[in-house]
Amino acid sequence: MMNNKLYKKLVIAMMITTISAVAAASAADTTASVRPVDLAQAESIQARAKAEQQEIKAEKAQQRKAARAEAKAKKAADAVRPVDITPELREELAQKIADDAAKSAEKAADKRAKNQEIDPVIVIGRVPTNGTVDLNLPKTVQMALDYNRDIKNSQYALKKAEYTINEAQAGKKPTVDYTFGAQRSRATDVATYASSAGSSGTSRALLDIMRRLDMDPGAYAGSGSARSANSISNAFSNGISVNIPLYTGGLVEGKIDVAKLGKTNAQEEILRVEQATKYSAIEGYYGLLAYQELQGVYHEAVDNLQGHLDNVQAQYNVGTKAKVDVLSSDVSLANAKTTAITADNNVAIAESNLNNILGLPLETKLNLADHQLPFDTYNISLQEAMDYAMKYRPEVLQAAIAVQEAERSIDIADAGNKPTVAITGGNDWADNTFPGIDANKRSWKVAAGVTYNFYDGGATKAKVNQAKQDLLVARETEQKTRESVQLQVKQAYLNIRSAAQKVEETQTVVDQARENYRIQNIRYQAGVGINLDVLDAQLSLNQAQVNHIQALYDYNVGIAKLEQVMGVDVESGVIHPSLTATTYRG
């Protein structure tokens, strides 16, 4: 699109061209007269120039509109986030938070030391960094229970529930209120000044203005006029009132019952968290043990393949084996070393995970008392597990408590339809000197009253209906919880049985794979077998050992899972006393 400068250049060029042509024509024909101007061509040029100018104006208007839109969008964005958090500001904020936290911790520590109190919040670092801790399974579970922060929080919730009961019970007890008041005031007798103001010539209009401005009219009165009478007084009062509720229509009683149910629910929550913590600790312990066993399997494979490669290399050097045997053996050894490195890393991660569960520094070295996953008999029927869960599982009991709370809530809502009875009494004293107790100015009262709300617009009825719907929801939730727990128990039970069968089957496969590896080695060394048979036998042995360890892990963790979904109490140990787990079959 043309701009103004380009247009001007074109017009000038056209004029120069036209003048040159005219001059040339004049030189060629001196007798010619002045040639007329082509008006049609001039009008066409002028129309094109005008159209181009309009296009330029439209383009500039579009650019200005776009710029305004961009500025408006930027302003809106700045309104959402007016200031970017720069790295410098982030560093400043982080340092401030750290300093404030350190000061708060120091202040709290000084206060605890002064009151000889112990901080209930356990801090990670109960052993030195890079220290060593010896563990067995019961010790692991107990350490997790002692440290777990979720358990601590559930214990705090239980104390809160106890205080909630105290708060609800306070609704049945008398309340005593004491009030004290003190007042100092000034009163002005304007009438006295008004009578004297007339004799002194002061206008009543001026008197009104001075009174509104809180000025002393007597100060401006003429000689001999009477001044206004100012009086400053003090007043002190004391009052004691007592309110004794006799009947609240079941409101307070219902709140007390709900608070007590809340305490029971908090107790069950502690058990639930403890059971989850126990399972987490067992899972972490057996997880580390399983990875350590896998680590041994893969390092054993590296040793086997290294020995085999040395044997193949020696036979190749004397010309009894082909180069391809050396290369394939070397490749298998390299793959085994890679797998062993992964196994080492898995052990380190599992150890850090267990340290985290126990609240120990992540660098702590853990020495496990067990060196292989156990395979103990676990005798319990599915029906016994179901019955136990329906009776003791915390979630089942909590769902039943929720139903009871919903029933109590209906009574609480219905209390609005019943009268309330209370006795009130009080004593009041007043005096113009502190502390405001004058026996001659004492007053007292004793009263009894009944309050009954005949009509509240249907609010109480609506609350009752809401509470009834909440009861239906609670009952449905209870049934859903029972069905869910039954499903969890059956799944955990079947997983244990499946894992037990896998343990027995994989143990047989491991024995066969180990024997096959031994035979293939002998055959190869005797020259009647091939190298591929040895390598395949090693891989089969590795896979059999991995499957066996996985089955043992699933079995032991499965027992812990079954006990969790059954709701077995954590203080009973790893195996519940009513169950048997005595015969070792590993």
Image (cartoon, rainbow, N blue to C red):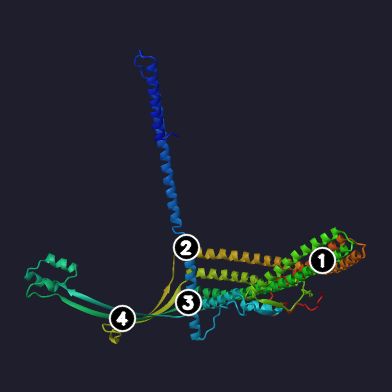
Separation of marks 1 and 2 at Cα, in angstroms: 85 Å
Q: Are marks 3 and 1 in contact (CB under 8 Å)?
A: no
**Residue 417: image location, x then y, percent:** 48, 68
**Residue 431: image location, x then y, percent:** 27, 83
Residue carrying label 4: 237
Disc 2 residue crowd, few under 14, some 14–19, many 20+, Cα 10 Å: few
Q: Quadrant of residue 313?
A: bottom right
Residue carrying label 3: 103
Position of residue 492 in the picture relative to residue 116 (left or right): right
The amino acid type found where label 1 is placed reads Leu
Which circle marks residue 458 in the picture?
2
Q: Do the residues labelled 2 and 4 touch (CB within 8 Å)?
A: no
Looking at the rendered structure, the secondary structure element under dot 3 is helix
Rendered position, 2 above or below 316: above
Residue carrying label 1: 305
Disc 1 residue crowd, few under 14, some 14–19, many 20+, Cα 10 Å: many
Q: Residue at x 47, y 67 (%)?
A: 92
Q: Earlier in the sequence, mark 1 or mark 2?
A: 1
Separation of marks 4 and 3 at Cα, in angstroms: 45 Å
Q: Earlier in the sequence, mark 4 or mark 3?
A: 3
The amino acid type found where label 2 is placed reads Gly
Position of residue 26 in the picture relative to residue 579 (left or right): left
Separation of marks 2 and 4 at Cα, in angstroms: 43 Å
